[in-house]
Image (tube, helix red, strand yellow):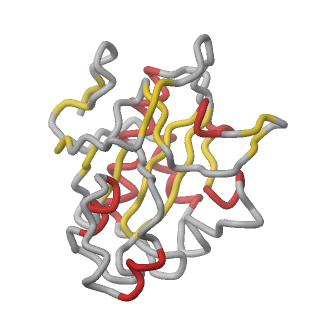
Amino acid sequence: MQINLDSGWLHNVRHLPSPNCNERPEGLVVDLLVIHNISLPPGEFGTPHVDAFFTNTLDHSIHPYFEGIAHLKVSSHCLITREGEVIQYVPFHKRAWHAGASSFGGREDCNDFSIGIELEGTDFVPFTLVQYQVLAEMVKLIQAAYPAITTDRIVGHSTIAPERKTDPGPAFNWTLLGTLLSVGQSYD
């Protein structure tokens, strides 16, 4: 994987552009990485529903849960599936709609200055080793492109929206991610 700094897209991953994004405020430095989890319906993996949700093509009639999210227009920069596939929905230089009402370091609206990475999963189901390996590789690429994202500025959604969100949840192994980030291995 590589990031094309001009386009904001990763090379060698699947691109599925989402309309749920916009320009970042002019002059803002991207200095936060937010880790999320998602599965649609909750707890079901390997479905096409996350792609559909992020591209506003989700058929809300096929599952009762989907009716409750029909009004939402959201996206993330990338999703890492249980098998380690990366899907990119929004180029990194654009503002994805992943954080919602949020704050970090006294600054509101984290979408303005953050990159959002979704892991296919739930708060309570362990993530796969390959997800951590791919996430660590992505974090290293993102940090090289956006050096203001230091290790202490990699947070969970629950950190920036603690009253609304719990992800990536207690099943997320922050220690493992830290270990993978500290070794010089690549997982191409």
What is the quadrant of residue 89 in the picture? top left
Image position of 17 (left or right of 74):
left
Instruction: Give the residue drawn at x 20%, y 41%.
Output: 15
| Whether residue 89 is situated above or below residue 59 in the rendered picture | above
The front one of 90 and 73 is 73
- Residue 90 point in image, percent of width and height: 35, 37
> Residue at left 45%, top 81%?
125
- Judge from the rendering whether residue 127 lies leftward or rightward of residue 124; answer left or right: left
Q: Position of residue 43 (x, y in %)?
A: 39, 83
In this rendering, the answer to whether 164 lies above or below 42 is above
Query: Would you identify the image quadrant in which residue 56 lies?
Result: bottom left
Q: Is residue 178 visible?
A: no
- Quadrant assignment, res 60: bottom left
Q: How far across and how far down the image is residue 149, in percent?
A: 59, 29
Left/right placement of residue 124 relative to residue 137 reads right
Q: Looking at this view, is 143 or 117 the one in front?
A: 117
Residue 148 placement (x, y as % from top left):
61, 22
With 118 as the anchor, is 31 left or right in this view? right
